[in-house]
Image (cartoon, rainbow, N blue to C red):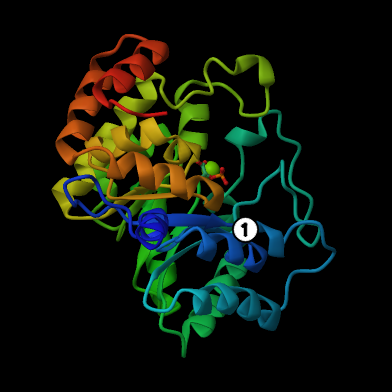
Amino acid sequence: ARASAARRSRGPGRTADGHHVPLLANVGGPKDLPAALENGAEGVGLYRTEFLFLDRADAPTHEEQVAAYRAVLEAFPGAKVVVRTLDAGADKPLAFLPAPAEEPNPALGERGLRMMRLFPDMLDAQLAALAEAHRDTEADLQVMAPMVTDVEDTEWFAATAARAGIEQAGIMVEVPAAALRAAHLAESAAFFSIGTNDLTQYACAADREIGTLSRFQDPWQPGVVELVALTAAAAEGAGRPCGVCGEAAADPALACVLVGLGVSTLSMGAAALPMVRAALAAHTLEQCQAAATAVRAARTADDARRAARDALPGLA
Ligand code: PEP
Ligand code: MG
């Protein structure tokens, strides 16, 4: 019994009726690998690469980058490893680049892919290091860009990754304009990964850093749920995988709702994996879909939470 309990708490993500929902880990560097492996991550859904670039005077060397990426790829032979290209901006400035212009609203400024389009050599160097790190490993390397807004961004990133020899190039959906046009973006993105932290910030026009706005920093907000639904449906229509890698994926009830909306993978901080695995195992796909329908019909975020609880019996 103990062995099977351990298997249940470590095995792949599955609904009660056996629908596989890969449960992936968010990692910020090789230091996060032990927790990801211990908690049974089926791969990495978000490798935040900022740690290599921030708080230092010089850009990381090619060798440094290769070593950091290879450590993560080697930990997951045969599994998916999604690496997010550098997500820096005025709020996370890089000492080795020209000082960014003063921005009154850094969240709405030159960040993420926008900054890489200003300094394309940096993105080329990162992608070259990733391609080299991937050589001689068994991992399924996928790259994705943060802060993608439109078809032009998507095409530019996919073409840049292809030039580096990386064919699996997807995008984070965290700008509402991208969610609204997901069907068009899917034509040049290999996959979507919804970043619900920023998607919520931008959909509700509520800065993530301002504590008094917490009512709006809530992925249960009906407007956010609707953008997720739209994105998942567009991905399904285009035959593209669609994950969620924001905090929403770590909420057991919301994780079930996301699966019901058509999200295909969930990525989260490793500590949340066992609870989300248990919540999925306790409900069928049909129950998740019914919960999603009830949540979409709810008028407020609190009503949505209650509707999900009612539709998903037995959640702690
Ligand atoms: C997000 O925005 O949801 C996300 C996963 O990225 P970050 O929290 O690093 O902005
Ligand atoms: Mg984000």
Quarter residue 222 falls in: top left
Q: Quadrant of residue 31?
A: bottom right
> Which residue in the protein does label 1 denote?
28
Give residue 245's position: percent from left, percent from top: 45, 47
Question: Is 135 placed left or right of 229 in the picture?
Answer: right
In this view, 49 is above or below 17: below
* Residue at 74% across, 47% down: 100
* Residue at figure coordinates x 70%, y 59% from the top left: 51
**Nearest the camera: 6 or 33?**
6
Q: Is residue 250 left or right of residue 51?
A: left
**Front-lying residue, 267 or 235:** 267
Does residue 5 sit above or below 149 in this rendering? below
- Residue 156 seen in the figure: no
> For numbered disc 1, what is the local secondary structure?
loop
Q: Residue 67: x, y in percent?
A: 64, 80
Residue 219 shows in this picture: yes
**Quadrant where the N terminus is found in the figure:** bottom left
Q: Where is 222 relative to 149, above or below? A: above
Camera-side residue: 155 or 56? 56
- Which residue does the image show at 54% across and 79% down from the upper left? 128
The CB of the residue at mark 1 lies under 8 Å from ligand 1: no
**Where is residue 39 shown, x and y percent of the image?**
50, 58
